[in-house]
Image: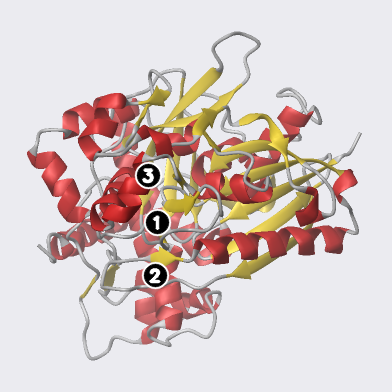
Amino acid sequence: MPEFILALDQGTTSSRAIIFDAFGQPIAQAQQEFPQHFPQPGWVEQDPNDIWESQLACARAALEKARLTAKDIAAIGITNQRETTILWDRKTGQPVHNAIVWQCRRTAPLCHELKSRGLEPIVQERTGLVIDAYFSGTKIQWLLQTYPEIRKRAEKGEIAFGTVDSWLVYKLTGGRLHLTDYTNASRTLLFNIHDLKWDELLLEELGVPAEILPEVRLSSQLYGETDPHWLGGPIPIGGIAGDQQAALFGQGCFNSGQAKNTYGTGCFLLMNTGSQAVNSRHGLITTVAWGIPNGQARPRIVYALEGSIFVAGAAIQWLRDSLGLLETAAASETLAASVPDNGGVYLVPAFTGLGAPYWDMEARGTIVGLTRGSTRAHLARAALEAIAYQTRDVLEAMVADAGTPLNILKADGGATANNFLMQFQADILGVPVQRAAIGETTALGAAYLAGLASGLWTLSTLPGTRAGSEGYFVPAMDAISREALYQRWKQAVARSRQWAS
């Protein structure tokens, strides 16, 4: 039996592929960035063909580095940037418009219209989500309203909608499969997370024809095989999960009450709530964590509370690429540590609005506290601190909803390599932070789901996650300093609110 899993991790700014062995260890990987497009302020697009071609190139490169062939791979697991919306021609497989990225704010007016019609309580009850431009539903609505020809073709069944996972499965299988999983479906604003099906009322309210929707499947099952042309032979596809749910699975947060934070382009804090879909009273969303076989007619569905921070590592990229203050993202750690404190400088990176717990589509990026003595080191430190402050905002809401305090925060994602950020995160939370030994737990989670479907592992034999000896950060800041810094952050956030309204 093949003993390797190929994980495809399609992210917001880059695609990567990682091959894991039977012990859950990465043995080869490849990564490739692809272009982002900003047609108007607040708009974010990607070329779906760039997504596909970069992901395919990474898969081929990883196989070559590992000196493996398709026959050596037990299954492929796919994890992806969520909510990003793609429409394509069912026959030709060609996109009919650029992908509208999850960060895009163009549908804010449509969201206001839906709210004015009193739909928010219904949406939250059925989908677990709030009405926000973040989610896929209004992106589809915008495309169909803006391009009447696409709407006509959609109603005839000639157009397919998919989040990035659906797009990749469609391309990998040569157009044979049009499907998604419960985790990605639960991010569309169109899926009833209790009945586990597309919601007819919401489809009608948003004007989305059911003909364009993918079939919804488990997060772990054998869906079909790749076209032999792409990777040198057919490979089973066995796992699909949105990136943050995959990270929760990869971190081994299988029990209710366990939580993780993924530090990437955005920042996403998820807490496993078990079989109960907990309705948030504090600005969080309820989402499907995963759906896996249960040996019974109804699958095992696990839910989670989630807080979404739109800009985290992207703020460091902004300092590097737009302002030219950093040569590399990694340089932010040394620069931030070169000053004893933030010098009173706070950066609220609300470049695309604020997510949980504020859900302010009109908030915009703000820097406050600048003096003549402020330096690029203070800005770098303020950007890193902002990631930790936003995480505390979400965690406080999560603890209030769940009713129990968190004793430890599990951390993963690229930015966890920054020791300054991890220590400051522990300091501002007042609880320890445990960094995963394998930073790429998003890909690992997808690999686990695919490995379960292929029979390589069972739930009881999953390799598990480990924390390295250097991966445990204990709070070192006194409570008075912690609260003083956090209250100033809250003041800075207040100054960013409703700026674009």
Q: Residue at x 37, y 44 (%)?
A: 154
In space, the residues marked 2 and 1 are separated at their CA atoms by 24 Å
Residue 484 location, x and y as percent? 24, 58
Residue linked to disc 1 = 477
Disc 1 crowd, CA 10 A, few/some/many (<14, 14-19, 20+): some
Residue 339 visible in image: no
Q: Residue at x 19, y 47 (%)?
A: 111
Earlier in the chain: of badge 2 and badge 3, it is 3
- Classify residue 68 as left or right of residue 116: right
Nearest-to-viewer mark from 3 and 1: 3
479 to 272, vertically: above or below: below
Residues at marks 2 and 3, CA–CA distance in whole angstroms: 37 Å
The residue tagged with tag 3: helix, strand or loop? Answer: helix
Left or right of 89 on screen, residue 127: left
Q: Nearer the viewer, residue 58 or 402?
A: 58
Quadrant assignment, res 107: bottom left
**Farthest residue toward the bottom?**
372
Of residues 258 and 101, the one drawn nearer to the viewer in this rendering = 101
> Element at badge 2?
helix
Residue corresponding to mark 2: 315
Residue 146 in view of the camera: yes
Instruction: Classify residue 247 as left or right of residue 375.
Output: right
Q: Position of residue 458 (x, y in %)?
A: 75, 24
Location of residue 287 by image quarter: top left
Q: In the drawing, what numbered circle is on residue 154?
A: 3
Amino acid type at circle 2 is Ala
Q: Secondary structure at mark 1?
A: loop
Point out residue 42 in the picture as x, y percentages from the top left corner: 27, 67
Q: Earlier in the sequence, mark 2 or mark 1?
A: 2
Q: Amino acid at mark 3?
A: Ala
Q: Going from the N terminus, do you reach mark 3 or mark 1 first?
A: 3
